[in-house]
Image (tube, helix red, strand yellow):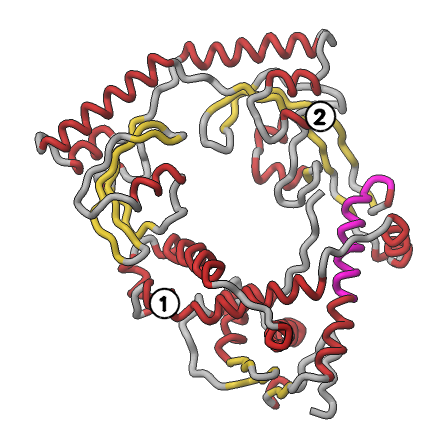
Amino acid sequence: MKKIKIAFLFILTAFLSNAQPQVIDKVIGIVGKHIILYSDFQGGVQEFTKDGSKLTDTLRSRLFEDLLFQKLLLAQADKDSVITKDEQVDAELERRMAYYLAQFVSEENFYSFYGKSSAAFKEELRDDVKDQLTAQTMQSKVVGEIKVTPSEVRNFYNSIPVDSLPIINSEVELGQLVKKPQISSDAKKAALEKIQGLHKRVVSGESSMTAMATIYTDDPGSAKTGGIYKDIMRGQFVPEFDAVAFKIKPGDVSEVFETQYGYHFLKLLSRRGDLIDVQHILISPKLDNADMNKAKNDLDSIYQLILSKQLSFCNAAAKYSDDADSKNNCGTMVNNSTGTTRFEMEELAQIEQNLVFLLDKMNVGDITKPTIFMGNDTKQAFRIIYLKNRTSPHVANLKDDYPRIQNMATANKQKKIVSDWITKKSKSTYIKIDPEFQNCIFEYNWNLLNK
């Protein structure tokens, strides 16, 4: 069961305020020694209304209140000497800049939009990121490790008016048994020999890296650019790639190395601080029909054992499945969005339409014949799906929906703790609000009447 973490809009608002072109600023609030700028507020507004949504009084108040909450957390962090280490700030900056650069594709596009380099932009972000991380740490101290007892869950459920209970859509619980085709040693040897030959031609000067990448690389993401990737930050590629790319010097060509995708070698074109431009060639070992047929035949044999009840699905998954995430849990699939083992049919339809078609014809306890699918590693594999359970649309109840109601009860308890904390701390903290925002309808009691 996933732990439920309270998520306030202030984190997103503060993040987004730096992702928007800045407006003319003014101070619209002060909490302790920390100020709230109009640009902080406006950044959130722009994000939440970019799809055409209207800025309602409720949303306007909520966005501003989230900023107040962030600054109150910072004010308390000052008193409690809560410190955010530089390493934490650096790691978060790297993550955010990778996100930004991915949106703009190139450094040139980034500069055109912001009027500054990504390095300059990153440095300007540092103080804001540090404040956000500090506020999150303080928030964790306020909320703590919240747990609810079964009696608290029952009491919370009973407190909800009957006509306000949520309607739960149809959900399914699934198991899977996966067989991945194994690439033959001959295929690996052939791929390695091929890339070693290309490497030799490039290093000797017989052929250019650009020509070899354009003709031979198995990487569709860079084939059209002659193997070139620009403005790459650490963490954007698999660790083995980073280990080579960030070690060699500009102009150097690496030795051949292996990743989950196959065999590579690369040339470092340039380095600008934390950004690099690289050119690389990938040769992937090829699956042939024999490899695919063997995986399918192996799974067919397992399917027959399950169908004839010589082996339970649970034991079969534990013994034969190639899916590390589910094999030791009877093959049970976990919904990464919710942390539970349930999937709404509408949700599955957006992810795997073909799977929904299969499930429509199945009864609880049925298993599918082996079918081909694309795994998370973007490689083809075969699997058997087991329909463990299916629920009909219904009003939430404790018997069928306990984990969901437990999450709701936990969130409600967290909200109460935050409410009490804000009420208490706002009494002893200097807070000043611009007249433009004094008419906000706040969710929490900020003790603002005499301020």
**Above or below for 336 versus 428:** above
What residue did someone put label 2 on? 387
Q: Residue furthest front?
A: 81
Residue numbers of the magenta segment = 399-416
- Residue 48 showing in the rendered view: no
Q: Which structural element holds mark 1?
A: helix
**Above or below for 265 versus 385:** below
Q: Earlier in the sequence, mark 2 or mark 1?
A: 1
* Point 40% across, 58% down: residue: 97
**Above or below for 259 versus 62:** above
* Point 32% across, 35% down: residue: 220
Q: Residue furthest bottom?
A: 450
Residue 379, percent from left and from top: 45, 27
> On the rendered structure, is 7 left or right of 392?
left
Spatial CA distance of label 2 from label 1 is 50 Å
Residue 307 among those drawn in magenta: no
* Point 29% across, 27% down: residue: 283
Of 264 and 154, the residue lying toward us: 264
Badge 2 amino acid: Leu
Of 45 and 178, the residue lying toward us: 178
**Above or below for 327 versus 110:** above
What residue did someone put label 1 on? 121
Q: Which structural element holds mark 2?
A: strand
